[in-house]
Image: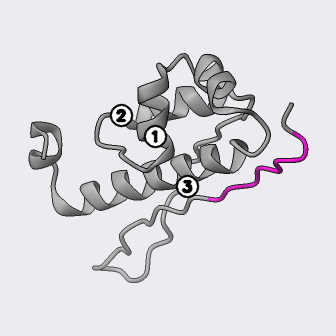
Amino acid sequence: MSAYFRSMPAPRLRIDAECKARIAAAIRTLSVLFNPYVMALRMRLTQPQFSELFHGHLTRFSFERLLLCVTRLGHDVHITLLPAPPVGYRRARIGRIVIIDKSDPDRVG
């Protein structure tokens, strides 16, 4: 495990892993449209790096790098921050993270 992950608290590690897994799944979905060589070129990855990404070995990829890969494949990325509604006077609810994939593989080109 890298020093980056060892230094993170457990909730952040879970969120980071979930985000990375969702982005990798979107990239795997797009692989139906392109051959691996073309996808690697468009994402500016080497063939071994693309293979690692395709097979889910995400420890070598930062969240930011995966976002760049997705945008290079023609997807827009929207990150929205909303305030969590207060539950009570003394206790506010902790916010949550929701990832919504609205991609349509038939539209990518």
Identify the residue at image location x=17%, y=46%.
5
Residue numbers of the magenta segment: 100-107
Q: Nearer the viewer, residue 96 or 109?
A: 109
Q: How many marks?
A: 3
- Taking the image as drawn, is residue 81 in sight? no
* Mark positioned earlier in the residue sequence (3 or 1): 1
Q: Are marks 3 and 2 in contact (CB under 8 Å)?
A: no
Q: Amino acid at mark 3?
A: Leu
Q: Are marks 3 and 1 in contact (CB under 8 Å)?
A: no
**Can you identify the residue that label 2 sits on?**
62
Mark 1 neighbour density, 10 Å: few (under 14) some (14–19) many (20 or more):
many
Identify the residue at image location x=18%, y=62%.
10
Is 106 covered by the magenta stretch? yes
What numbered label is drawn on residue 53? 1
Main SS of the magenta part reads loop
**Can you identify the residue that label 3 sits on?**
82
In the image, residue 37 lies at what x, y percent?
63, 24
In the image, residue 48 lies at what x, y percent?
42, 28
Identify the residue at image location x=47%, y=61%.
97
